[in-house]
Amino acid sequence: MRTLYNILFAIFFALSAPFYFIKMRRRGKAQWEKTKFDWNKGFGQRFARYDSRLKQAITNRHTLWMHAVSVGEVNICTQVIKALEPRLPNLKIVVSTTTTTGMERLQNVLPSHISRIYYPLDLRSWASRALGTIRPEAVVLVEAEIWPNFLWRAKDANIPLFLINARLSRKSFRGYRFASFLFRPLFRAFAGVAAQNEADAARLKELGCRPEAIRMVGSLKYDAARLDERRMLDVPGMLRQLGVPTEARVIVGGSTHDGEETILAEQFLRLQKRFPDIFLVLVPRHFEFSREVGKKLAATGIKFVYRSEIVESTQYRPGEIQCLLVNSTGELKYFYEHATVVFIGKSLTAKGGQNPIEPAAMGKPVLFGPNMSEFAEVVRSFLAADGAIQVGNKEELEKALAELLASKARREELGRNALKVVHDNLGAIDRTVEMIVKHLEGGELYVAPTRR
């Protein structure tokens, strides 16, 4: 099985590599233009080539390898690290990510003593060299991204494997089950699995996870949604630069996908006739397509400006700009914090949805479309508590936006209910950390007692 996988992966990699690196280069160049983040730095780490600085940092140290695929997982990872470090104070933590946006986020939010690397591509020699260099006491994967060679090598080296914040969409579940001959032994290898809910636990068990390894801890996204880090963006100041009145009602479209920006812009132009003080902020999920989004916005007639065009000297007159198009990464939560109403993208014109917990944790009224399958349990919790509004189409969205813009009392009611749902679901990170620590106790690592 391993031989067959490696032959097929090598063929697939050879065929897809040009497209993979072109996409990476395009996204990296867009990041450089917006944030001056050097996407080339650390490129060799994808082939398990590490510099002397990293090797020196882990020499004679007990290490823990945590993997966070991209920005969403990075936000969870940072909260887990905050809770884990006091329990394992002598442990050196190495965090990997797959995307350049994930790496930029790691560089911004993690303290310097935590090493950051790119996850190696899943060829046998690169996975072996990566694990042989890092020599982790354990590997923690944030959400289910299963790469066979890496897990095979870790299993062969008797490295404990953990899967946290484990959730499986129907699509992922069907894929893993279809290839159960390959993935079932890998799921069985996990020493600990922190599942979000009973449905995910049942799916993970069916895929091969041992029942005794599974713990139901809840969603780590509730804990990770807390805005307790240093503010890195002055949103009110930016809105003043755009001529937006202090008392203006701000609609934020977060993590929008193709088509949703146009829908929101057209609805905004109609709603502005009834609510003259409103302002629109659009934050596309894939910022590298912002220029294409801008062309579509221009066709609607809305007056907008790109986030990257705002500098210290920028100043517009009131009414001159109607929309801010955010073509940067890692700033969405700061716009959520100052939103009057929030629409969650990838839920109207695309499928799967995006995370509604972050704005809910700030007590914001949240709207989303019918396609929220990747957050089905979270959505059920919010809807059951009247902590969010789900619409079936763009007509219902416009109607719901109008109702919320017109009623401060209704906005506050939704926000209070959403915040209660978040508070009722806190604690998943502490339960996850206890699962990891329990498995590592009894060895050479010093485990500090729980602080009361």
Image (spheres, rainbow, N blue to C red):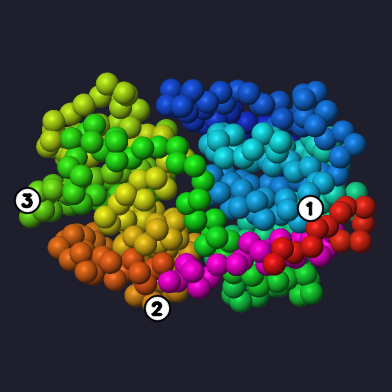
Residue at mark 3 = 273
| Alpha-carbon span between mark 3 and mark 1 | 58 Å
Query: Which image quadrant: the C terminus?
Result: bottom right
Return the x and y of residue 352 as percentages of the image width and height: 45, 59
Based on the displayed image, in which of its 4 quarters is residue 404 positioned? bottom left
Tag 3, which secondary structure? loop
> Which mark, residue 172?
none
Given the image, on which type of amino acid does mark 1 rest?
Answer: Leu
- Relative to 190, say whether 50 is above or below: above
- Which class describes the residues within 10 Å of circle 1: few (<14), some (14-19), or many (20+)? many
Is residue 163 part of the magenta span, yes or no? no
Given the image, on which type of amino acid does mark 3 rest?
Answer: Lys
Foreground residue among 3 and 310:
310
Q: Nearer the viewer, mark 2 or mark 1?
A: 1
Which residues make up the magenta segment? 420-440
Instruction: Write the residue at 33% across / 66% down.
Output: 415
Residue at mark 2 = 384
Q: Earlier in the sequence, mark 3 or mark 1?
A: 1
- Which class describes the residues within 10 Å of circle 3: few (<14), some (14-19), or many (20+)? few
Residue at mark 1 = 88
Return the x and y of residue 365 as percentages of the image width and height: 31, 62
| Alpha-carbon span between mark 2 and mark 1 | 39 Å
Foreground residue among 282 and 83:
83
Instruction: Write the residue at 72% across / 30% down.
Output: 45
| Alpha-carbon span between mark 3 and mark 2 | 33 Å
Given the image, on which type of amino acid does mark 2 rest?
Answer: Ala
Residue 394 left/right relative to 183: left
Return the x and y of residue 14 as percentages of the image width and height: 67, 32
Q: Earlier in the sequence, mark 2 or mark 1?
A: 1
Can residue 382 be seen in this snapshot? yes
Q: Does the magenta stretch mainly form a helix, a strand or a loop?
A: helix
